[in-house]
Amino acid sequence: MQDLAIIVLAAGKGTRMKSALPKVMHRAAGRSLIGHVLHAAKALSPAAAVIVVAPDMDAVVAEARRVLPEARAAVQAERLGTGHAVAMARPALEGFAGTVLVLYGDVPLISAATLEALVKTAGQGLAVLGFEAANPHGYGRLLQDAGGNVAAIREELDASPQQELIKLCNSGIIAISGELLWRLLPQLGNGNAKGEYYLTDIVELAGKAGTPCRLAVCPESEVAGVNDRVQLAAIEAALQAAYRRRHMLNGVGLAAPDTVYFSADTVIGEDVTIAPNVVFGPGVVIEAGAEILSFCHIEGARIAAGARIGPFARLRPGAVIGAEAHIGNFVEVKQAEIGAGAKANHLSYIGDARVGAGSNIGAGTITCNYDGFEKHRTDIGDHVFVGSNTALVAPVKLGDGANVAAGSVVTRDVPANALAIARAGLDIRPGWAARFRELKAARKAAKKKG
Ligand code: UD1
Ligand code: CA
C-alpha cells in the first residue's frame, strides 16, 4: 500500500511483566512482540513507520529496525494517553498525506489480512478495528449509530451501566487519513476518568466534523494483548498451535505436534518428519525429506535434503548440514559446515569447522576451537576418517582421505591420505591380571582369619 504510514505505540514499560526488559521486547515463538506486529504491518509495505517509545528504550527502536530498517523513533517523555502518544509521532511524519495506521506494540497476533481490510474500510476517512469480546471488562466499548458506523468509543471507566453491557469492543487499532488525524488530534481533551488524551475520542470528533467512523471486525484472538507473563504464555501457545497446523498442512510430518516448538521464521520443506520433543529457535531452514529425531534443539541452522538429525542433537547458529548427512546423539555443531553424506553420530563437538563430504567423525571427537581468547578453525577434507576420542586442536587441517587414529591429539596439519597417530605406547603383560586377583584374594582371606 503506497500511501500508508504506521505508528506503533510501545511506550508502555509493562510493569506487570516484572521484568527489566521493556514489555514489547519479550519474545513469543522466537520473535519479539513488536517484531510480530511489524512483520504483519510490513506485509502492507508502509511508506513510513514511527515507533513511539518511552525514554531509554533505544533497544526497542533497534529491534523495530531489524524488521523495518527505515522505522523512525518518537519519544513520549510522559505517559499522557494514546492520543498524546500519536501526537509525538507527528513530527516524524511531517508532510505525509496518506492513511495512518495506529498499532499497539503489545498486540502481536494481528494478521496482515485484517490490517489490510481495516485500511480498505477506512478509505479516505477513518475506521476502527472492533471485536466481540467474550468478556468485555477493561476494554473501550464501540457505540454504533443507526447505520452501523461507530459514533463514539467509551472507555469502561467513563461508560454508563447500559454501555457496559455492550460486547463490541475497541481493539485500539485504527486507520485514519493523515489529513483528518492531524486536524483533529489537537482537539482531543483529557476530561475523562483517567485524565488522559484518548486517541479513541477522535471517533466522535470525526463524526461531528462530517466523517463517520467505519467499523472493521476481527476475531478476539487476533487482538489479544500482553500485560503479564501468563498472557505472554497464552500468546506463545496460540502461535505454536498456528505454526504446527501450518507446517503439517505444508507437508511436514509431526507425530506429536504439541511437543514441537517452532519459531515464527522456521522454514521447513515437504516430507520432513519431526519426532516428538523438538525445539526450533530462530533462523532454521530445513529442506525436503530431512528427518529430525527426538530431543533436538536447533537454532540458526540450515539442514539439507535427506539429512538425519538426532536424537539429542544440538545445532547452534551457523550449522550447515549437507544432504544425507547424519548428526547423532549428543553431537553439538556450531559455525560449521558438514558436507554431503558426512557422519558425526555420537558425542562430539564440531565448532568453527568444515567437514568435507563423506567424512566420518568418530564418537567423542572434539574440535578444540577456543584457546581462552580466540576461536580457531578446523578444516576437515572429504572422505576423512577421524577415529574415536580425537582432539583436533585448531587451527588445524586434515587433508582429503586422511585417517586419524582413535585417541589422538592432533596439533599439526595432516596431509591428504596420511595417517596421524598420537598415543602413548601400549604395554601388554601376559598373566598379570590372574596373578593380581590371586594375591588380592589371599590377602583378604588372611585378614578375615586374623
Ligand atoms: C486502550 C483503548 C481501549 C481499547 C484497549 C484495547 C484508549 C484510550 N483506549 O485501552 O479503547 O479497548 O486499548 O486493548 O486508547 N500507550 C502509550 N502512551 C500512552 C498511553 C498508552 O504509548 O501515553 C500505549 C501503551 O503502551 C499500549 C497502548 O498504547 O501499547 C494502549 O494503552 P493502554 O493504556 O494499555 O490502553 P487501555 O487502557 O488498555
Ligand atoms: Ca492495554
Image (cartoon, grey):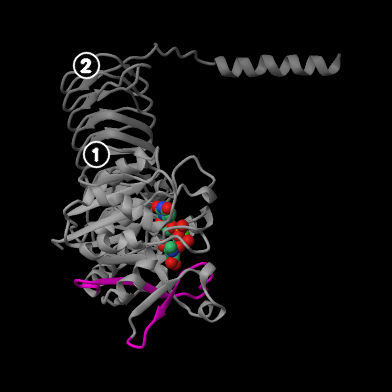
* Residue, far left: 2
Residue hosting label 2: 413
Q: Horizontally, is 196 left or right of 127 in the view?
A: right
Viewer-side residue, 25 vs 368: 25
Crowding at label 1, few (<14), some or many (≥20) Cα neighbours within 10 Å? many
The span shown in magenta is 122-147
Q: Amino acid at mark 2?
A: Asp
Label 2, ligand 1: CB separation under 8 Å: no
Q: Using the rendered image of the protein, determine whether residue 36 is visible from the camera's viewpoint.
A: no
Residue hosting label 1: 342
Screen quadrant of the N terminus: bottom left
Q: Using the rendered image of the protein, determine whether residue 362 is visible from the camera's viewpoint.
A: yes
Viewer-side residue, 362 vs 129: 129
Screen quadrant of the C terminus: top right
Q: Horizontally, is 34 left or right of 338 in the view?
A: right
**139 in magenta:** yes
Q: Residue at (35%, 78%) from the top-left corner?
A: 150
Q: Quadrant of residue 176?
A: bottom left
Q: Amino acid at mark 1?
A: Ala
